[in-house]
Amino acid sequence: MNSLAVRLFLSATIWIIFTLVSAGLLLSDLNEKSNFNAFEDRLNLLLETLIGASRVDSSDGITVVSTIGDPRFFQPYSGWYWQVNHESKTLVRSRSMWDQVFTSDKRIIGGRSQFINSVNDNNERKNFIETKKLHIIERNISFPGIEGPLTFIVSGDTEEYQLNIKKFDNTLSVILFILGSGLMIAVFLQVKFGLLPLNKIKASLFKVRNGDEEKLKESYPLEVQPLATEINELLDHNTKIIDRAKTHVGNLAHVLKTPLAVISNEIKTDDNIMNNQVLLMKRHIDRYLKKAHLESVGASSKEKINIIELTKKMISIFNKLYPEVKIKLNKKIEEAFVFGSMDDLEEVIGNIIENACKYGRNQIEVEVKIIEENSLQLIISDDGSGLSQEQMNKVFARGFRIDEQKPGTGLGLNIVKDIVETYMKGQVDLQKSKRLGGLEVTIFLPLSMSQKVF
């Protein structure tokens, strides 16, 4: 899980779910206890009403002189019952008990009669009165004229408050689900909005890499500003290191120039091999001296280069140098800009096409295409004998040459890899060409702007 946004969202989501579930269970438990207490209070009120309405009759029995206020005590098997006992003898009971009685251990017995629901579809099915789940309370009361206490019993069907609890739980679940969904959406928006400064830094770094900016110039929140400051200081430090390295290269080339001139004077004029090598060394030294000087005065700063036009230019040059080789350009885009040095890109494309002309036969294909929104692919293929996997692994090494008989220094592909990967933040890959059968060199470069496709 490498995404900071996913980590923040998941951690917040887990906490929200835990909190809401805990709150839901607590509220449900409190509601259940509250409903039960209210139900029991009601039964106690009915029991007190029953006791207040009871009178001793002439036969030393108990008569309930008035109703206790709930019509369900008259509905048979309703679950709402009352009964008055003297020891184990039942003195009086509610109409709703019908042929049932409470025993001393609060069990209900009897009930041989069954009430059948006659309203059905086909008379094949008979609906009997369902079993009730009762909650029973009792109280012992002494009455004048009766020896020993009387036991007053009242029961109620718990279905009433159980339905209330179920409705509350369902409503609570819906409310908590909506609340949780809203909180997760809010967390998602908060994370997305909170991480926007990091996206701004990413966009600014992309501009720095493509040469549109030199530093991160936008303002950032207090928590992110130190990061932007450190990045700017790192960019300044890297610039100083690069400038120092360029200065050393220029100094080295300048120091070598004088000893090389002495060597050149000592070589015999008829030694063509040595003269050619000295001339080649002078050319390379002059080139790097010139490059170091231009970079030191800022004349060789990087720029946006249309690689399509540059590729056409290089192909035109090598068509003249190798007229027997057919070089074909395949392009699906009209223009593609990369950020870099013109000299560096000329050296990269020139080295690869020159190698293809040397080691190929008579056909080379160059293809330029955009593979992603901000990435370009330059593919150069030849119809030569290609390279083995072992040779592909060694070919980028400094001084390595496949064919010692052909002219060269063995530095070309090493320079290409160094320029592409170090200075242009790209990548160089080698593989066998599926179309031409020879070597296929693929260069990945970051784009500097959006492209226009044919």
Image (spheres, grey):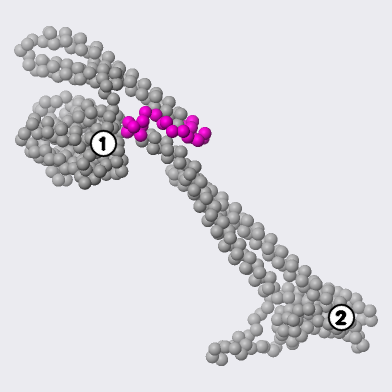
Of badges 1 and 2, the one in the foreground is 1
Q: Residue 54's mark? A: 2
Viewer-closest of 224 and 40 = 224
Name the quadrant containing residue 17. bottom right
Name the quadrant containing residue 51. bottom right
SS class, disc 2: strand
Residue at the image point whose x is 43% and y is 33% from the top: 218
Q: Which residue is mark 1?
A: 337
Q: Is residue 292 above or below residue 28?
A: above
- Image: magenta residue range: 207-227
Q: Position of residue 436 (x, y in %)?
A: 13, 43
* Residue 10 shown in magenta: no
Q: Position of residue 326 (x, y in %)?
A: 8, 38
Q: Position of residue 293 (x, y in %)?
A: 26, 17
Q: Is residue 214 visible?
A: yes
Q: Position of residue 156 (x, y in %)?
A: 73, 75
What is the three-letter code of the residue carrying label 2?
Ser
Between the C-alphas of marks 1 and 2, the distance is 103 Å
